[in-house]
Image (cartoon, helix red, strand yellow):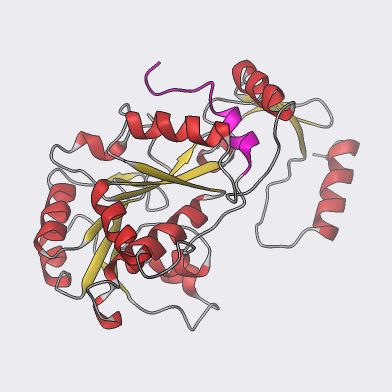
Amino acid sequence: MNTPPVTADLLSTGQRVLARNYAPGKLGLVRGEGSRVFDGDGRDYIDLGTGISVTSFGHRHPEIEKAVRAQLDKLWHVSNLYYNEPAVKLAVELTETSFAERVFFCNSGSEATEAAIKLVRRAASATRAPQQRDILTFEGGFHGRTLAAVTATAQPKYHEGFEPLPGGFRYCPFNDLDALEQHFDGNVCAVLIEPVQGEGGIVPAAPGFLKRVRELCDANDAMMIVDEVQCGLLRTGKLWAHQWEDGVIPDVIPDVISDVASQSVSLSRRAVRGILKTFSSVRPSISRRTYSPIKSGSLLFWSPRR
């Protein structure tokens, strides 16, 4: 079957000028509408991938378009050197509807994971030596493709060619309580876990597994990072996927708010206390981001209370 001319030209040019870090299918998409995307030759397709768990509201959602256009007429970008109204309002929505007391905005799931790793390590540095700041993650998980995030991803296929990898990570079989007990000791400062593994094959945590992680974290003065980049924000029927397990309150959540690739790291009182302790002697610049008010503004149409 011959590829139509507009699509063929787009594919040919893309293959010539884009880095080959992915192997995209032979589609050249030019626009989207709701759950459908269209190529340059007018053929339409159902978008079952949602941009890898991003466009959960579909393409060109009218309320999102309205919010983006409204913000474009106001303020585009100021980084985090100043407060801006959309970010503050969105943070209020997130903190008032979750466990979190503070929110750190960033630009991607990997960046959110990196920030969470830095935050728990920084908090642990107040009371722990470097060799006591291991982060425990789980086989089959996926946490991103930046160097620390890909190291936290306990899948060797993602590690190949990027050695030497950062140290301080240990891996445990998922949903194995005995292995969890064996891998957990006083040198673990945090656990990083997905309530539902995405890359691992859509595998939910077994009943009681998240709760036991929480109990071990409490017993060892470690923090629990719940990675909900792919399963949070109502994708499982609750606002956060970890809420299906009673008694599980995380310290940190790297999460994605769907639709304009807007990410956040939500912090509990415990995480905030631990991190702010270190700021008494160190200036608060452990993580910065160039996060646009347009992204925050575009999401103000959304509220988990609606």
Residue 148 lies, with reference to residue 100, above or below; the image says below
Query: Which residue is rendered at x = 31% and y = 52% of the image?
Result: 272
In percent of width and height, residue 262 lies at 54, 40
| Image side of residue 235 versus residue 37, left or right | left
Q: Quadrant of the N terminus?
A: top right
Query: Which residue is rendered at x = 60% and y = 23% of the image?
Result: 35
Q: Quadrant of the C terminus?
A: top left
Task: Please identify the dominant SS of the magenta region.
Answer: loop
Q: Quadrant of residue 59?
A: top right
In percent of width and height, residue 211 lies at 14, 48
| Image side of residue 246 versus residue 47, left or right | left
Is residue 293 inside the magenta stretch? yes
| Image side of residue 168 versus residue 12, left or right | left
Residue 25 lies, with reference to residue 135, above or below; the image says above
In percent of width and height, residue 181 lies at 11, 66
| Image side of residue 117 versus residue 271, left or right | right
Query: Which residue is rendered at x = 62% and y = 51% of the image?
Result: 290
Is residue 38 inside the magenta stretch? no
Residue 21 lies, with reference to residue 209, above or below; the image says below
Q: Quadrant of residue 161?
A: bottom right
Residue 201 in view, yes or no: yes
Magenta-highlighted residues: 292-306
Query: Which residue is rendered at x = 41% and y = 31% of the image?
Result: 92
